[in-house]
Every structure is written in structure tokens, then in C-alpha cells.
Amino acid sequence: MNIDQIKSALFKQATVLQTGGSRPTELLGESWIGKVLWGKDGETIPSNYEPICTIFLSNIPYVPKELTCYQLITIYMDFDVFNNLDMDNLISFFKINCYKDLDELQKKNEQSTRIIPFPLTPLLVDNDTPSWEDSNNIAPEIENEILRLELEEGIEYYEDIVEKLYPTHKLGGYPSFTQGGVSFGEDYPFVFQISSDEKARFNIVDSGSFYFFYNKEKQDWIVYCDFY
């Protein structure tokens, strides 16, 4: 394989959610960090959970197939999660609501007391790649070809194959692990991540991310965190 063939095999589509860059409207369809704007009547959220984000899926360019049945996801978080990051699954510190029908929604406008809220602007990318340390997401045959080209032609993975890494809020693509990657098997594929956000004043320990893995059949989540 040559470099172009390796890129073709590795690259994935993703929707990057950029913080700010547009005038807030708070209308149906606008995604947010630090704010949950919509929900069902009668929903109750524990008082120790903060609204983290609103992610509309109905109007963004790429959505992982596991989430295509939903039009909106809202996420709340218990900040005590930062005292328990050694747990294998952090889902007990998150409340994730998934909605299939926008007609059932009502305006909520709940704002975090710890994150500066901003609208999120979706951007399609088609060149997301895994970090080299994330061997779980690089097939052995591709890894062997990269190692061969490094030895025979002196290429460098990050210089010659990776065009850009996206360690930010995003749906799809690869988890942007900062340490060695983890896998929860084919039943729990990676679907999105929420990352440290300087503009929103949201820091996950040290420029880290929360990674969300979803089992569509069980409607079950795994949440993992890593950081520098």
C-alpha cells in the first residue's frame, strides 16, 4: 500500500462542533455547549446534575448510524465525575436524553453554572484519523503497512498520513485519545465526544475529553475519559 491507499483506508467522516462563530438564536435546531434548551414536559433531572450540551442531529452533515434514529440528544453531568475518573464506565455521572420526535419538545433553557454557554456550529470533515497510540482503531494490516513505509521510505505517520486531528466536540470519526486507546467491542462503538473547551471555560482535568460509546440494541451507554 502507498500513502494515498492508507489514507483512503483510515480516513473517516465526522461532524466537528465548533464553539461560537454564529449569533445565538436559541431556536429549535441550534446545538449548544453549556446549555440545554429543550426537553419533554415533566422530565426531572437530579439537582446535582449540570446541563452540559444540546446536540441536534436532524440538521448536521454527518451522524453515526447508531444515532440516526434520533433528532436530539441532551446531556447533563454530575461534576463529582472528576473524583471518580478511575472507573471503567462513568455513565452513572451522566444523564443522556435522546429524542426521536421534535414535536414533543418544550423550551427549557437550562444553563450551566460552571460552563460559559455558546452555540455550536457543525462542520463536516472527511479526514479524521486515529492517533498512532490508538492501536484499537488501526487495523493490523494497515499498521504493518505504515511501519513498512516508515522503515523503507522514512515516512512519519503524523507528517505524511495524518492531515489533521480533531480533539474537540464531534460526532463520528475516531475518539481523540490522548493516552493509549481503549475499545469496548463492536457492540459499543464510539459515537461522539465532548472535549475541553477553552472558550466555554470547560476543562476536563488537563485538556481531556469524555468519549461516548453506544449500544443501539440495548440503548445503553459507556462513557470514558482521558487527558494529558
Image (cartoon, helix red, strand yellow):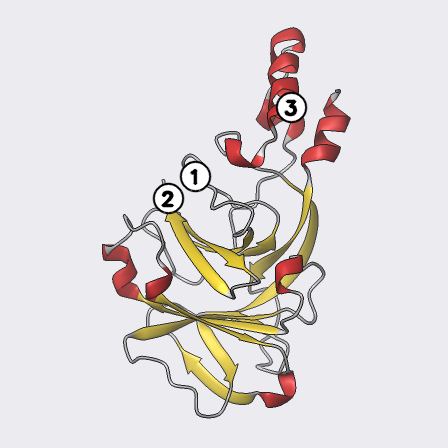
Amino acid type at mark 1: Thr
Residue 198's place in the image compared with 10, above or below, is below
Q: Residue at label 2?
A: 227
Residue under label 3, please give it: 141
**Which image quadrant: the C terminus?**
top left
| Kind of element beneath mark 1 | loop
In the rendered image, is residue 7 in sight? yes
| Horizontal relation, residue 166 to residue 75: left or right | right
Q: Residue at left 62%, top 60%?
A: 66
Mark found first going from the N terminus, 1 or 3: 3
The residues tagged by marks 2 and 3 sit, at their Cα atoms, a distance apart of: 28 Å
Image-based side of 226 in relation to 189, left or right: left
Mark 1 lies on residue: 178
Is there a contact, CB below 8 Å, between mark 2 and mark 1? yes
Residue 160 location, x and y as percent? 66, 24
Residue 97 x, y percent position in the rendering: 49, 74
Front disc: 1 or 3: 3
Whole-number angstrom distance, CA of label 2 to CA of label 1: 6 Å
Q: Residues within 10 Å of mark 2 (few under 14, many from 20)?
A: some
Q: Tell me the quadrant of the picture where the N terminus can be found.
A: top right
Q: Nearer the viewer, residue 195 or 142?
A: 142
The Cα–Cα distance between marks 1 and 3, rounded to whole angstroms, is: 23 Å
